Image: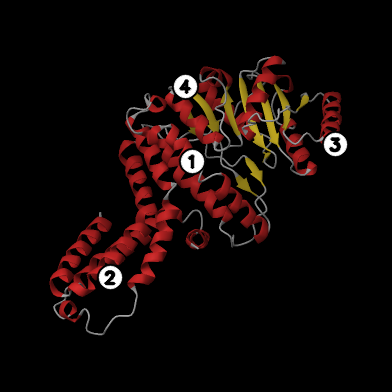
Amino acid sequence: SLWLCYTIFQLNFARLVQNKSPNSMWRVWIVLAAEVCLSFQELVLGINLIFALFYAREGSTRPRYSLMGNAAPHIDVFVTCCGEPNGIILDTVAAAIAQDYPTQQFRAFLLDDGHNAELHAAIQLLSKQSSATGGPKVYYLSREVRSGVKSFFKAGNLQFGIEESHRLGRSEFIASLDADMIPEKNWLRRIIPHLILSGDIALACTPQCYYNVLSGDPLGQKAEFDLWFSVYEPLNDRLDAAMCTGSGYIVRRSALEAIGGWPQVEAGEGFMCSSVLSNAGWRVACIREDLQFGLAPDSLRSYIKQRTRWVLSLLPSIFPMVHKQFGFYLPGSKMTSQLTWVQRGVGILQALGEYAPITNVLALILLPLAMFPYGPNEFANITSKGGYKWIWGVFLASFVVRKVNNYMLYTHVGLREVFNFQSLDIW
């Protein structure tokens, strides 16, 4: 509200400039445009907060559960990989089969898109060792992708695993881990009760945590994921608009079958699957328990490579493409015909948020133009009458309230870490 007041006062100030110092008008409009651009990302989050405050479902705080005893549904655990180091992959598979879960009620599948013969042999050995000690079976699966046919990368690998595991005996649920995400021993027992107790929940997912982030988080890696999984995603969960985070989730096989299998996209497969499930009347749950831990880029070089890959391979083609497939969540699209208006609103905000980097860069281009050298008396006619002194008060109030709001939202993450992340986000 204060931001809107400040913007209105700025518009009034532009009127004063037009009347008193018309030659300075261009500066005022450039500053106003830059401030609006720089506030765009925060404004989107603010609207999301308002949605969560006033339109959240009853009993929005999810309880914590643990499945007791040996009466448990059957789960197939997938580990997807494509060229990661063998040691990292085998650590994840070993953790997957070491679950505190009835051994006859789950199997592990390594879905290898890297066609690694050495890894295949290692998995066969691991499977023999597991079977000899009464552990679960471990399967190695690697699909053949024909030349000229789209592989759909991870989405295609998951669908291959869904079909092949069904051929080997249908399970009621499917769990999945990225190649470097090691689950806690009670991962399955902690997540599966949410799907057992709520038949309309199709997918339940947990935050992604990292165990190798440098002290102080200088690159904002931990802060970014902490913000998403402890602020933004719980907000969306309160509105029945949570999304699949890509690893550490359990999904109901019948729900996937109801939507025709895992949606085939080249990336953003978790987001796409969540949206299709929601439109089909299913719910996606965000479980706020740290149950999986993986590797973040451990050098500036690898960090930049990761971000470059995300930007070049994801942002221009995936999220806008996915949002476009859903008609940007506006009425009239078959892909969103069954979404509630709140889910539709969250989808629109997410689509807008993907374009925030453009507005940030635009603001950083506009501000130096507005600071172009000007004469000492250019604003004399206005400042002498206190023309914009009253704007200072509104700006100060808005600034203080924003700082208090940030403290309330982000203090559990660490204000220094959040500051690092936000600074890096701009740079």
User: Quick one: SS at disc 2?
Assistant: helix
Q: Earlier in the sequence, mark 1 or mark 3?
A: 3
The kind of residue on which mark 2 rests is Arg
Q: Is residue 394 visible?
A: yes
**Quick one: label 1, few (<14), some, or many (20+) residues within 10 Å?**
some
Identify residue for label 1: 319
Residue underneath mark 2:
27
Residue at (25, 56) in percent of width and height: 4
> Which of pointers 1 and 3 indicates the residue nearer the eye?
1
Q: Secondary structure at mark 1?
A: helix
As drawn, is 102 to the left or to the right of 122? left
Q: Which residue is mark 3?
A: 118
Amino acid under label 3?
Glu
Q: Tell me: 389 left or right of 146.
A: left
Residue under pointer 4? 200
Residue at image coords 75%, 28%: 142
The numbered mark, 1 or 2, whose residue comes first in the sequence reads 2
Of residues 398 and 331, the one nearer the viewer is 331
Question: Tag 3, which secondary structure?
Answer: helix
